[in-house]
Amino acid sequence: MVGEAAWNSLPAAVQRRFGKRLTGGASVVYQGTVVTMRMNPAGWLLAQLARLLGGPLPYDMSSVNQPAVVSVTEDCAGEGQFWIRQYGRAAGFPQVIHSSKRFAGPTGIEEYIGAGIGMALRVTADPDGLLFESDHYFIQLGYRKLRLPAWLRPGALTIAHKERGNGRFLFSLTLKSRLFGELVHQDALFHDVEA
């Protein structure tokens, strides 16, 4: 999706993680720790409201220095992958975020969070890893996808996967709004289980 030259410029560990084909219902698991968590008041409110749709955004500031786990499993029916991210909290059950990434749409990849809501992503490579940036948000009604108008979009989402060496990588999620600035930012440092 990033082109052969950009793919070949990526660190070998990033190529290995994203070039891995999961078939037959196979899963891969990454373990780590949340290292940074920020949200402004508008971001906190948005994250709480998004819990009505399954909680696709991190919402608990107490997740810093708590364990994090990511599980990626083949989506046999949807020709993509299920992603489950689990973030520990200072008290209570961990937050669990689930989504489905499918190789579809005008950008070639879409992420679904449930209730028919999804976003098209643009993927680019940089020297340390991959960037996934929201192109547009949509609601799927049957086979039709309706783009959300600008006033309904939560903001520009960027997810970064940055190689850190020795089987480690940084997963960063940033949601920014033109009106409210940086709404939510989270960094989690993961390691390959097999490393």
Image (spheres, grey):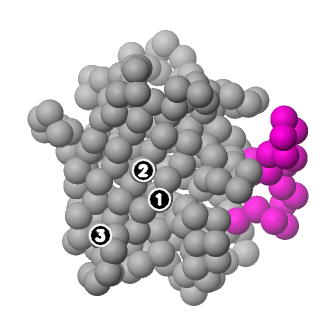
Q: Is residue 58 left or right of residue 154?
A: left
Task: Name the kind of residue labelled 2 in the image.
Answer: Ile
* Residue drawn at 47 percent across, 14 percent down: 5
Q: Which residue is mark 2?
A: 84
* Residue drawn at 80 percent across, 45 percent down: 140
- The answer to if 146 sits in the magenta stretch is yes
Q: Is residue 60 left or right of residue 156?
A: left
Residue nearest the viewer, comparing 135 with 80: 80
Task: Name the kind of residue labelled 1 in the image.
Answer: Ile
Residue 97 vertical placement versus 92 (above, below): above
- The answer to if 125 sits in the magenta stretch is no
Rounded to the nearest angstrom, the CA distance separating label 2 from label 3 is: 13 Å
Which labelled disc corresponds to residue 97?
Answer: 1
N-terminal of the pair, mark 3 or mark 1, is 3
Q: Is residue 61 left or right of residue 35?
A: right
Residue 27 vertical placement versus 9 (above, below): below
Instruction: Locate residue 190, reporting x and y percent.
Output: 25, 50
Rounded to the nearest angstrom, the CA distance separating label 1 from label 2 is: 6 Å
Residue range corresponding to the magenta coloring: 136-154
Q: Badges 2 and 3: C-beta atoms under 8 Å apart? A: no
| Structural crowding at the residue carrying mark 2, measured as other residues with C-alpha within 10 Å and reported as few (<14), some (14–19) or many (≥20) | some
Instruction: Locate residue 28, reporting x and y percent.
Output: 30, 35
Rounded to the nearest angstrom, the CA distance separating label 3 from label 1 is: 12 Å
Which residue, as the protein is rendered here, is positioned at the far top? 4
Q: Quadrant of residue 105?
A: top right
Q: Badges 1 and 2: C-beta atoms under 8 Å apart? A: yes
Q: Is residue 85 left or right of residue 42?
A: left
N-terminal of the pair, mark 1 or mark 2, is 2
Q: Which residue is mark 3?
A: 88
Secondary structure at numbered mark 2: strand
Residue 7 vertical placement versus 58 (above, below): above
